[in-house]
Image (cartoon, rainbow, N blue to C red):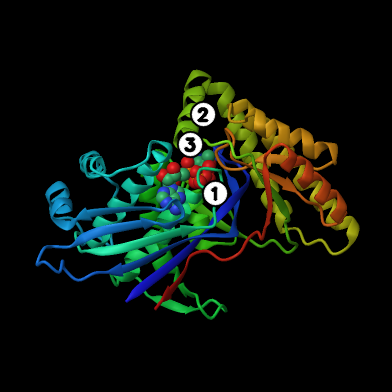
Amino acid sequence: MEVRARAPGKIILAGEHAVVHGSAAVAAAIDLYTTSSLRLLPAGEDGGAGAVELDLRDSGLTFSWPCSRVRAALGEVGGKAGAPTPCSPDELAAVAKLLEGQEIPEAKIWLSAGLSAFLFLYTSILGCRPGKAVVTSDLPIGAGLGSSAAFCVSMSGALLTAAGAVGVAGGSGDEEWELFGKDDLELVNQWAFQGEKIIHGKPSGIDNSVSTFGSMIKFKKGELTNLKSRNPVKMLITDTRVGRNTKALLAGVSERASRHPDAMASVFNAVNSISEELSSVVELAAEDEIAITTREDKLAELMEMNQGLLQCMGVSHSSIETVLRTTLKYSLVSKLTGAGGGGCVLTLTPTLSAHTVLEKVATELESHGFRCFKVEVGGRGLQVCRA
Ligand SMILES: Nc1ncnc2c1ncn2[C@@H]1O[C@H](COP(=O)(O)OP(=O)(O)O)[C@@H](O)[C@H]1O
Ligand SMILES: C[C@@](O)(CCOP(=O)(O)O)CC(=O)O
Ligand SMILES: [Mg+2]
């Protein structure tokens, strides 16, 4: 049997980084997915124990670990599917050893964090059983749209389904994909968080939560509130194509916070107020043009304020500033999304803005070498399909 699980990426409308330090943040799922397919394999044909295989389709790379080697490195692991536990320093060291023999091209060395998360999740949930996972993704990787969380959520969903630890609860309205029940989603989310910790260092948990549960959420100190956005929030996304690494950016903000604890506490507090206000504005129902414009003006102003505070944290970048300046020429407000330092920028596209303006701004942004695309905001979280 093959299990396929897909999990969405996300945008953060307000509160990135500050959320790691206890502030509220607002995030929404987007309609770009990472899909993990998993097939358990019989033991090796030669009477051997078989292998754990990972095929990263988009990068054209495949990895294979003989089960005997996995067992020698990690001992008798597995059987923990129902009780997520963090990756201990010893386990992380053993996983790092398993990566040593693999040929990871220098230009893609950033994949090693994802490979470590995969090995940890696979062996914790399924033990040393042979199997093959194939991963594909619509998301740009390392660009602020939560590819790391979508990878961990889709992989945890597929592994837990194969282990029989979670089961499908019903249809999603889409013939191909089915949904999990709330408790099962909770279990997937907890495992995905353990994987995200390997990739991010100290994640807040917002990315894996929104990827698992979908929709638009307010998230504060691990508590999730579903936001009912009665009017659509429309965003243009610009990928600056400047690569960056969430773990390093998180560490940079934490170092700044330890150098300037009082000032940074005020910054995080201001972000908290922005996220709280933004989450109530999102829920406002706007029925006429004046109400729609008022709501969008408030959202824009809050995003602009949040961007200023992200600059204070030291996570903006000259490419992000170019996007801000370019969109401002067309009276459109933007802010970075995710960890910053490059990656993606959100531009609020007001309901009443002319189509021609949006085309012009996208053309100008693309003339800088950036890539623009539109996404649907606030859709489904994790979905599964068994073939
Ligand atoms: N499809 C994937 N295959 C393998 N690793 C992945 C995949 N998607 C994400 N990752 C891992 O997550 C890392 C990117 O995560 P991160 O720096 O948090 O950026 P973001 O989550 O914004 O895309 C990659 O360097 C890689 O280790
Ligand atoms: C910066 C942060 O708030 C979001 C990181 O998102 P991304 O990995 O850049 O997509 C970190 C976190 O909340 O774990
Ligand atoms: Mg990430």
Q: Residue furthest top?
A: 259
Q: CA distance from mark 3 to mark 1?
A: 13 Å
Q: Amino acid at mark 2?
A: Val
Tell me the quarter of the picture where residue 157 sits. bottom left
Establish whether ligand 1 lies closer than 8 Å to the Cβ of label 3.
yes
Do callouts 3 and 2 mark residues in contact (Cβ within 8 Å)? no
Q: Residues within 10 Å of mark 1 (few under 14, many from 20)?
A: some
Instruction: Give amino acid for label 3.
Output: Asn
User: Residue at the spot x=35%, y=73% of the render?
Assistant: 2
Residue 87 spot, x, y in % from top left:
28, 46
Which of pointers 1 and 2 indicates the residue nearer the eye?
A: 1
Of badges 3 and 1, the one in the foreground is 1
Q: Is residue 232 visible?
A: yes
Q: Which residue is mark 2?
A: 253
Seen at 82% across and 61% down, the residue is: 286
Q: Nearer the viewer, residue 305 or 104?
A: 104
Residue type at mark 1? Pro
Please name the residue that numbered disc 1 is placed on: 140
Mark 2 CB near ligand 2 (8 Å cut)? yes
In the image, the residue with mark 1 has its CB under 8 Å from the nearest atom of ligand 1: yes
Most foreground residue, 377 or 70: 70
- The image shows residue 344 at horizontal and vertical percentages of 62, 42
Give the side of residue 198 with respect to residue 24, left or right.
left
Residue 283 percent location from the top left of the image: 71, 58
- Quarter of the figure with the C terminus: bottom left
| 75 in relation to 212, above or below | above
- Label 3 vs 2, first from the N-terminus: 3
Mark 1 vs mark 2: which is more N-terminal? Answer: 1
Q: Which residue is mark 3?
A: 245
